Amino acid sequence: MSLSVPSWDELLDGARESAVHLEMRDTYRVAGEADDFRAWLETGQIDTDPQSAYWRPWVDLVRRTVARGVRVRRARIVSEPVSDYVRYEHTGTVVNLAAGEEVRWLPRRQASDIALPGNDFWLIDGRLIRWNHFTGEGASAPGEVSEDHTAARLCATAFEAVWARAIPHDEYKIQ
């Protein structure tokens, strides 16, 4: 049974122990970052100020989540050589780290034997899944929330397997 999709604030404010996020696409075309991505492609410049209007809502949310003792981890499975989008994402990850997230990168070739769910997700406290759906072109599609125990176990197992192999952000060098 699908539950109503909470806002990001509601989702992370409800976390008590952990919030993990697995990203598996090489390109996202999320409307809210389109202008920033286009500017980065043209200039190589990206907003990495955690206090900027662009980043502050996310940074504040993650900081208050981490301040409650919740561990926030993000893992990204990426093809190599990486796409322009992954280069952009890698450059901006310093803000995620400043907010308190832990971020790791796993080259896709090293994930071949890991059972992965079909969609990106957030898993809250090992039980609540926020599925992130995207169109074929990478635009955001309506998300979905589930408390299905089997799916939550798959997500938890997949995330931990990726995390164990993945390279911490500060050590991952873009090829």
Image (spheres, rainbow, N blue to C red):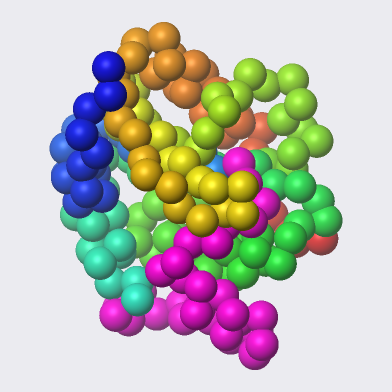
Image quarter hosting the N terminus:
top left
Q: Is residue 61 above or below residue 41?
A: above
How far across and down, in percent of the image, does residue 100 sit?
35, 55
Q: In which quarter of the image is residue 126?
A: top left
How far across and down, in percent of the image, does residue 117 sit?
55, 25
Q: In this view, does 144 lie above or below 102?
A: above
**Which residue is more in the foreground, 96 or 25?**
25
Q: In this view, does 38 lie above or below 166?
A: below
**Which residue is more in the foreground, 8 or 72?**
8
Q: Is residue 127 visible?
A: yes
Q: Is residue 40 left or right of residue 103?
A: right
Work out which residue is located at the far top of the displayed protein and give it.
150
How far across and down, in percent of the image, does residue 114 sit?
67, 21
**Which residue is more in the foreground, 133 or 117?**
133
Q: Is residue 163 above or below residue 27?
A: above
Report the number of numbered marks: 0
Image quarter hosting the C terminus:
bottom right
45 part of magenta stretch:
yes
Q: Can residue 122 be seen in this view?
A: no
Residue drawn 61% across the image and 47% down it: 136
Residue drawn 28% across the image and 55% down it: 62
Residue drawn 57% across the image and 53% down it: 138
How far across and down, in percent of the image, does residue 141 sit?
43, 47
175 part of magenta stretch:
no
Residue drawn 28% across the image and 72% down it: 56
Q: In which quarter of the image is residue 86?
A: bottom right
Residues shaded magenta: 24-53
